Amino acid sequence: ESSFTFSHPSSPTKKEETIMSFASSLCTFLPFTSSRSDKRVSSLKRSSVHHRVRKSCNKNGNSCSPILRAVAAVPNDDEGQNRVEENEWTSTTFQLDRILEVAIKAANEGGYIMRKFGSEGADIVKTKVNTRDLLTQYDKEVQDIICSKIKSNFPNHRILGEEDVAPGADAAIKATKDAFIPKQSKNDDGEDPNGDYVWVIDPIDGTTNFVSGMPLSAISIGVCSLETKEVVVAVIYDPFRRETFHAIKGRGAFMDERKISVDNCSKIDDCLVATGYAPTEESSRFLLETTTNLTKYPVRSIRMLGSAAIMLAWVACGRVSCYIEESLNAWDTAAGALLVAEAGGVFTDFSGKEYDIFTRETLASSGNTEVHKLLLDAAGTTTTASAQR
């Protein structure tokens, strides 16, 4: 058996790319597969690749890619770890693995631009809805980098990117509906020209923070099934902390290689609540009235971080207990909604309806029924009062 080492990540050989692709699947599936020889990838092959990856990462240290470091950290079959019920490796399984891999790479490339040009603040190119809704040259640049990566790997997939949509809630709602129009025809090869997935992208979530040089902005990528409209892959990348939050539907949520879960807050007065508001008068009023309602309970404290993606990722990993905001767009919430759900939390609108890609009201919590109901009451009272004006 020939030995090998991985060269620098920026210039992998063809052999290394093959191993890295296999390693990406190994990273996700190693804990979920049995050692039966009738699996598509045998236990022997998994063990061999895992050994090589771990040996290479031990030798190369920090120069080893994040994906390979994650693989190296997973216990091998012969280390006495318990395995859950075996799952079949289908074509969809590998497709979602590949989508996640591309999404993480795209987010990392976009994050490099954010770190390079946003650490000290960035110039405002123009405003959108009003002077509080900002745009920098890097929003479009980061989105273009992500879209290029998607198109080079999945040319038939659809893309819904914030920077391609006109400002305002009505335009966002229409663009989201248009992105999920059912496929109509197939090409001569029998393949749908629009693919089976829709990528929903916010290239820089938290632009005001980014402009001000505050390290609280993120890249949010949610990938949805065109048929079911469900989010099936999620990546939120915080380039300033270099934290990658990711999930595949049904497989749990992770921050880098560590599995994450929501906090265990069971009483409203123990909850740390995150909130925010859109640059509109109605949203400002909602923020003030909901905050007043929450302080009457009271909750432990309230935080406003300026990035929906970060606040949802932080609910998923237990840094905050819940997040409330009204009138968010699909690109603000798609990735975060899957992360929260896969981390054991609950995401609904203010009526208690479960999240879907068209949901604009955001209430994400750790899932305690009593706490979630009180949060619904706080938001619902405000919504009812606003409707009566």
Image: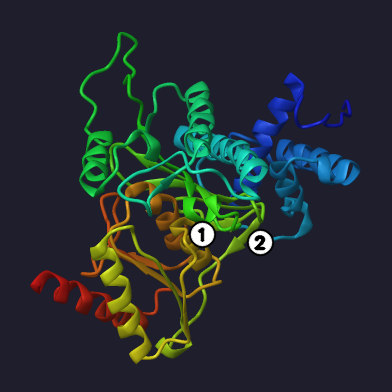
Secondary structure category for the residue under label 2: loop
| Quadrant of image for the C terminus | bottom left
At which x and y percent is residue 326?
29, 63
| Quadrant of image for the N terminus | top right
Residue at the spot of label 1 = 310
Toward the viewer: 173 or 215? 215
Residue at the spot of label 2 = 82
Q: Residues within 10 Å of mark 2 (few under 14, many from 20)?
A: few
- For image coordinates 24% across by 49% down, the residue present is 169
At which x and y percent is residue 78?
77, 52
- For image coordinates 53% across by 50% down, the residue present is 211
The quadrant in which residue 54 appears is: top right
Toward the viewer: 363 or 34? 363
Q: Residues within 10 Å of mark 1 (few under 14, many from 20)?
A: many
View extreme (left): residue = 388
Can residue 364 be seen? no
* Relative to 293, 301 lies left or right: right
* Residue 212 marker: none
The quadrant in which residue 193 appears is: top left
Q: Is residue 12 above or below residue 215?
A: above
Look at label 2 and name its amino acid: Asn
* Relative to 262, 169 lies left or right: left
Q: Is residue 10 above or below residue 231?
A: above
